[in-house]
Image (spheres, grey):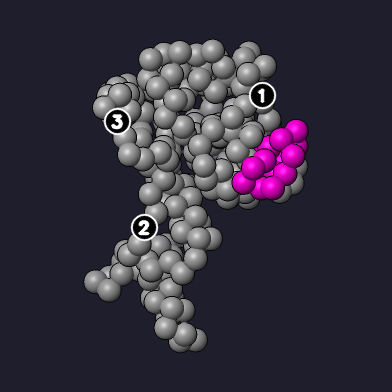
Amino acid sequence: MPEQRRIVVAVTGAGGTRLAGILLRKLVDDDRVAHVDAMVSANGRKLVAFEHGADENADAVELLLGKQSDKVSVWNPETDQAGPPSSGSYRFTDMIVLPCALGAAARISHGVANTLLERAADVCLKERRRLVLCIRETPLNLIHLRNLVQLTEAGAVIYPMIPTYYNVPQNLQQMDEEFVLRLLGFVGLDQTDYYEWSKSTGSAAHDDHLKQSQGVS
């Protein structure tokens, strides 16, 4: 049996935090994942509260996950700088930053590690582990682009929060779910072949969504 994965999920101050909630729920339900270390930056906590219509003092991870889970350890990146993901000896396998603000990407690209989030990303790069940064902002200026090139050269993967359209999604929930499932497939945790382009006419999702848009049962 393959070794179970230990994954760090980080949320920063960029819009689209609900996708992090979908990601966390999928990881908790996946038997291939042994443990999840979750952390939300100070600005991330503000956005989670805003996007969920909650108080800023609410537990951001619980808002995202919708429940508590023994599989998830929650860290405050500003006060838990010595948390386990800060050390290369803590053998987590992947780190996904979703969403990743370009300010956070800039600090990571320059080796700034003042918080647990930044330090965990730094550990990924030095230990040659998978670091996936799901950036959201647009347009990109030259500073952004140079930082993203530097991150790619250092070993990170830039995975923009861009939805696919060829599956003809009918609502925001479908778009969000497809993005997260494709992201999980990218890190080796395939969930479904529903969105896989498998024939000349597209995918199963494409066929279903097209029927839905045409009112065909």
On residue 76, the disc is 1
> How busy is the neighbourhood of tag 2: few (under 14 within 10 Å), some, or many (20 plus)?
some
Q: Which residue is mark 2?
A: 164
> How busy is the neighbourhood of tag 3: few (under 14 within 10 Å), some, or many (20 plus)?
few
Q: Which residue is mark 3?
A: 141
Does the segment drawn in magenta span residue 124? no
* Element marked by disc 3: loop
* Element marked by disc 2: loop
> How busy is the neighbourhood of tag 1: few (under 14 within 10 Å), some, or many (20 plus)?
some
Q: Say which label, 1 or 3, has the lower sequence index.
A: 1
Q: Is 196 left, or right, of 79 in this rendering?
A: left
Residue 145 figure quarter = top left
Residue 22 makes an appearance in the image: yes
Residue range (magenta): 49-65
Does the segment drawn in magenta span residue 50? yes
Distance of label 2 from label 3 (alpha carbons): 24 Å
Mark 3 residue type: Asn
Q: Say which label, 1 or 2, has the lower sequence index.
A: 1
Residue 92 position, x and y percent, is 53, 27
* Element marked by disc 1: loop
Judging depth in this view, the residue of 55 and 172 nearest the camera is: 55
Mark 2 residue type: Thr
Mark 1 residue type: Asn
